[in-house]
Image (tube, rainbow, N blue to C red):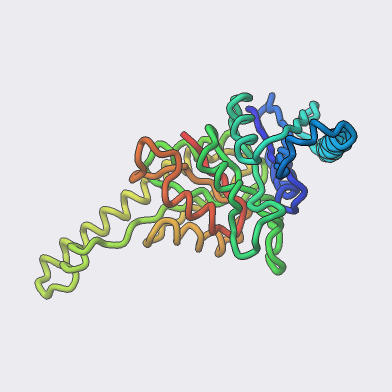
């Protein structure tokens, strides 16, 4: 597996490294620490070429900034332990989003890891523009890392608390396979399936006085829930292995809202879900549920591309 961790000097970026180190990645996994130095345009900057001393100072400053960024990654690299090999470090000039996506494509990465917000992130926004851009444009799965959980939430004695959100789509199946591939030796996993609320037709039947109509509506609800339980059991068997505790949970409501509520209720450290659900368009990488969860979940989110 090839992992690219895009870093700046924010706490969310540093939290990304801590999260990556809590996971047991497959043997042979390689990691690249990436920092993109944003190119700053100067009005009339082209005229520096005609002033050798100013141009010399400008290029010296660029080299200094580049060297500082490289040392920053080297220090972080020394702290990362994923197998025997130390991560590679890569510093490049460009626009942050463009530089990250280009690197992902060039390295044929399997996973991009980004902080939920960078240094310019505004507190009221749970997802920064670069992070959301990577989520939409990356050719691979994306892990959005958020900082440590709020005070009062105690860490689990069994390791990471993981919420795996599933439906009947191939993308949900891919998400479950990702969780299995990580081979977490100690984790508490909640497997969540959200059943949509009864449609207008079913709701109207429930309000009728004729027993046969109400019974038909209740039968439709039972069938839907039974189908949901079968989805949960299939996913539970797929991810089950020694040391992993999995709890199935079937709830009714709107998927994104219920996934976020479940993440809060279970004090999840990580939500894992597919990039698109059953209603996703084939031409789109990111579905509305994945987008909403990535934006508003109280914890880190891994969006798996099938």
Residue at 54 percent of width and 36 percent of height? 138
Identified at 33% across, 45% down, the residue is 279
From the viewer's side, name the closer residue of 19 and 243: 19
Which image quarter: residue 172? Answer: top left
On the rendered structure, is 158 left or right of 180?
A: right
Q: Is residue 283 above or below residue 216?
A: above
In the image, residue 302 lies at what x, y percent?
57, 45
Left or right for 47, reference 290: right
Q: Report x, y in % for residue 161.
A: 62, 53
What percent of the width, then of the height, locates residue 122?
Answer: 65, 61
Quarter the N terminus occupies: top right
Residue 110 lies left or right of residue 255; in this view the side is right
- Which residue sits furthest bottom? 209
Residue at (59, 61) in percent of width and height: 125
Name the one closer to the observer, 29 or 182.
29
Can residue 65 be seen by looking at this rendering? yes
């Amino acid at each position: 597996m090839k992992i690219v961790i895009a870093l700046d000097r924010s706490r969310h970026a540093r939290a990304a490294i801590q999260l990556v180190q809590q996971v047991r990645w497959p043997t042979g996994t390689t990691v690249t620490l990436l920092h993109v130095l944003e190119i700053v345009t100067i009005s009339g900057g082209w005229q520096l070429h005609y002033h050798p001393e100013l141009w010399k100072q400008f290029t010296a400053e660029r080299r200094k900034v580049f060297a500082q960024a490289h040392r920053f990654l080297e220090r972080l690299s020394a702290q990362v332990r994923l197998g025997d090999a130390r991560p590679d470090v890569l510093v490049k000039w460009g626009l942050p989003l463009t530089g990250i996506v280009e690197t992902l494509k060039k390295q044929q990465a399997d996973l991009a890891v980004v902080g939920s917000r960078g240094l310019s992130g505004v507190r009221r926004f749970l997802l920064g523009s670069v992070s959301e851009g990577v989520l939409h444009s990356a050719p691979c799965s994306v892990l959005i890392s958020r900082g440590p959980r709020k005070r009062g939430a105690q860490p689990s004695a069994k390791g990471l608390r993981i919420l795996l959100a599933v439906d009947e789509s191939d993308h949900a199946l891919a998400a479950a396979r990702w969780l299995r591939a990580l081979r977490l030796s100690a984790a508490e996993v909640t497997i969540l399936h959200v059943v949509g609320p009864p449609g207008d037709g079913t709701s109207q039947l429930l309000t009728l006085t004729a027993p046969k109509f109400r019974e038909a509506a209740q039968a439709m609800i039972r069938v839907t829930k039974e189908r949901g339980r079968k989805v949960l059991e299939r996913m539970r068997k797929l991810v089950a292995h020694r040391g992993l505790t999995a709890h199935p949970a079937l709830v009714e409501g709107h998927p994104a809202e219920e996934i976020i509520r479940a993440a809060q209720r279970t004090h999840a450290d990580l939500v894992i879900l597919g990039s698109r659900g059953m209603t996703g368009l084939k031409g789109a990488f990111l579905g509305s549920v994945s987008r909403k969860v990535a934006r508003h979940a109280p914890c880190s989110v891994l969006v798996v591309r099938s």
